[in-house]
Image (cartoon, rainbow, N blue to C red):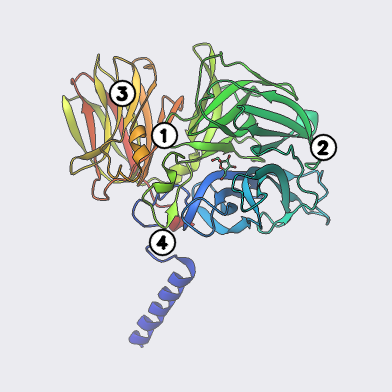
């Protein structure tokens, strides 16, 4: 009887393992982030169609269903209840014939302006994307980009392409990445879409998502050192003020991003960031094509997700069987710093639910380096430090066997710097060498520097000074290099407060 019981238990355990769990190896491969989204296998780039509906956050993304390199671009699909644990679903909108499905956005057509909902109670999710069309397969550069729509009446599970496509066509080779939102004040849809080489964001409006009218151009402005892609115009709350908002225009520039803050009058965006001042939502090497969610529940802050990779070397990063991940989703606010508007980013609050018990340290001062009694490659850390005069202070992760990743603060130049030159595999692409160090000015706030750091296997995100500066960087360290070390080159820095959490894997909690 006891034997039978044990046997049945074993069967039940095996069955439940088979039904509910993925095999141990999937999502636990070398370098696989544990609280960031990546597809189970194959290539991804830009986040697309970020939209919330009925308890689900949808993440569509540029996806190659057939391989671990860019190609056959289609919209992959994943859903989450908290923006941290993701469940991958089948491909949503697939490449068809000579047409790839490039980046775009999703809206919820609550007023049925497009007429896609035909039964009572139905609400259409509408995707607006760029069709990348190869006109003649023999002549490789003969391509056309225009804007298409598709709709879903079952929460993004199945899609129908609109028969009247394209909905916006200028006959141009490069015209892409429509981001659409409902502009309540003018009761109309607004689209931003880019001319990459001209550094222009165009604004269009529509009553029904099908007919689009040109309104205005923004740009060239700010950083025009690379092609412009993936723009986004949105209203962002002013921190600490009820019902006060500014308009933020985001766009990607070749391998990085920038933002502008100002006002939108229903037709034209008016930038208030001074000429010549370039500001970025992320100063690291690995944050691109970021866009924000549509249709979030009332009272939510806007949420931004970026592609955590860099076109210079993206195709060669040493990860298998997937390539590329999404950043931590970040909430947005704006505030004035020294008289100028600035974007503030915070990791989504749900990440706190993944914390294990914290370890804390107070008031540490030393000369040189100090090993912290914590270890790992899957952790969150908050540090407040008081950098000593002329000191170079900071923290090293993935330390071991002469390797490390440095997040440092140079007191004399008041710069936060990141150095991944000795962090592990840096030889997978010759251009990675050009992206080993970055530094960004951040003034000490009352003589303190506050860092909020997330380290997840092959990605590090640093939110500095309450999200005024964010830096995202990939690293490919040996799995054995798990030590964490503080540094203070002249011994004058006080590490006031350090709190460390190991984080649970989101893949186990889906
Ligand atoms: C940005 C981008 C977009 C384009 C997509 C193609 O990373 O180049 O402009 O729509 O990727 O995958």
Query: Which element carries disc 4, helix, strand or loop?
Result: loop
Q: Earlier in the sequence, mark 1 or mark 4?
A: 4
The yes-or-no answer for disc 4 within 8 Å of ligand 1 is no
Residue 110 placement: quadrant? top right
- CA–CA distance in space, label 3 to label 4: 37 Å
| In this view, 173 is above or below 467 | below
- What is the number of the mark on residue 207? 2
Q: Quadrant of ligand 1?
A: top right
Question: Would you say 464 lies left or right of 492 here?
Answer: right
Instruction: Write down the residue under mark 3.
Output: 409
Return the residue found at the far left: 367
Q: Are marks 1 and 4 in contact (CB under 8 Å)?
A: no
| In this view, 423 is above or below 185 | below
Q: Earlier in the sequence, mark 3 or mark 4?
A: 4
Instruction: Write down the residue under mark 1.
Output: 285
- CA–CA distance in space, label 3 to label 1: 18 Å
The answer to whether residue 220 shows anywhere in this view is yes
Q: Earlier in the sequence, mark 2 or mark 4?
A: 4
Question: Would you say 291 lies left or right of 362 here?
Answer: right
Q: Position of residue 314 (x, y in %)?
A: 43, 44
Q: Position of residue 265 (x, y in %)?
A: 73, 21
Dot 3 surroundings within 10 Å: few (below 14), some, or many (20 or more)? many
Nearest the camera: 478 or 9?
478
- CA–CA distance in space, label 2 to label 4: 45 Å
Instruction: Write down the residue under mark 4.
Output: 26
Identify the image quadrant of the N terminus: bottom left
């Amino acid at each position: 009887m006891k034997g039978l019981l044990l046997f049945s238990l074993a069967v039940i355990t095996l069955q439940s393992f088979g039904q509910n769990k993925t095999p141990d190896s999937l999502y636990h491969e070398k370098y696989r982030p544990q609280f960031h989204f990546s597809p189970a296998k194959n290539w991804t780039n830009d986040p697309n169609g970020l939209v919330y509906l009925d308890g689900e956050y949808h993440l569509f993304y540029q996806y190659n269903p057939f391989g671990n390199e860019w190609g056959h671009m289609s919209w992959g699909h994943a859903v989450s209840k908290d923006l941290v644990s993701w469940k991958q679903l089948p491909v949503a909108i697939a490449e068809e014939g000579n047409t790839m499905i490039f980046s775009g956005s999703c809206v919820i057509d609550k007023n049925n302006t497009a007429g896609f909902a035909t039964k009572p109670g139905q609400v259409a999710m509408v995707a607006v994307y760029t069709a990348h069309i190869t006109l003649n397969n023999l002549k490789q550069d003969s391509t056309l980009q225009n804007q298409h729509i598709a709709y879903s009446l079952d929460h993004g599970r199945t899609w129908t392409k609109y028969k009247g496509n394209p909905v916006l066509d200028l006959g141009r080779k490069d015209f892409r990445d429509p981001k659409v939102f409902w502009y309540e004040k003018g009761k109309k849809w607004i689209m931003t879409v880019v001319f990459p080489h001209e550094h222009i964001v165009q604004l269009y409006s529509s009553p029904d998502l099908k007919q689009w009218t040109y309104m205005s151009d923004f740009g060239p402005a700010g950083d025009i050192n690379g092609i412009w892609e993936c723009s986004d115009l949105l209203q962002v709350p002013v921190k600490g003020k009820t019902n006060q908002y500014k308009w933020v225009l985001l766009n990607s520039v070749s391998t990085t991003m920038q933002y502008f803050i100002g006002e939108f009058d229903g037709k034209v965006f008016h930038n208030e960031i001074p000429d010549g001042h370039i500001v970025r939502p992320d100063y690291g090497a690995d944050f691109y094509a970021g866009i924000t969610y549509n249709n979030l529940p009332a009272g939510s802050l806007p949420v931004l997700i970026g592609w955590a990779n860099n076109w210079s070397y993206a195709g060669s990063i040493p990860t298998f069987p997937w390539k590329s991940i999404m950043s931590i989703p970040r909430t947005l606010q704006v505030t004035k710093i020294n008289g100028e508007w600035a974007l503030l980013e915070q990791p989504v609050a749900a990440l706190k639910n993944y914390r294990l018990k914290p370890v804390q340290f107070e008031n540490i001062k030393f000369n040189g380096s100090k090993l912290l009694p914590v270890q790992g490659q899957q952790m969150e850390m908050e540090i407040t430090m008081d950098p000593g005069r002329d000191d170079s202070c900071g923290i090293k992760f993935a330390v071991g066997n002469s390797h490390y990743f440095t997040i440092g603060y140079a007191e004399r130049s008041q710069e936060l710097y990141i150095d991944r030159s000795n962090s592990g595999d840096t030889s997978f692409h010759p251009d990675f060498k050009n992206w080993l160090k970055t530094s960004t000015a951040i003034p000490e706030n009352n003589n303190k520097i506050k860092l909020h750091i997330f380290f997840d296997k092959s990605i590090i995100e640093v939110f500095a000074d309450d999200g005024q500066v964010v830096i995202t960087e990939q690293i490919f360290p040996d799995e054995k290099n798990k030590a964490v070390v503080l540094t203070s080159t002249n011994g004058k820095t006080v590490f006031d407060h350090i709190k460390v959490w190991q984080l649970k894997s989101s893949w186990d909690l889906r």
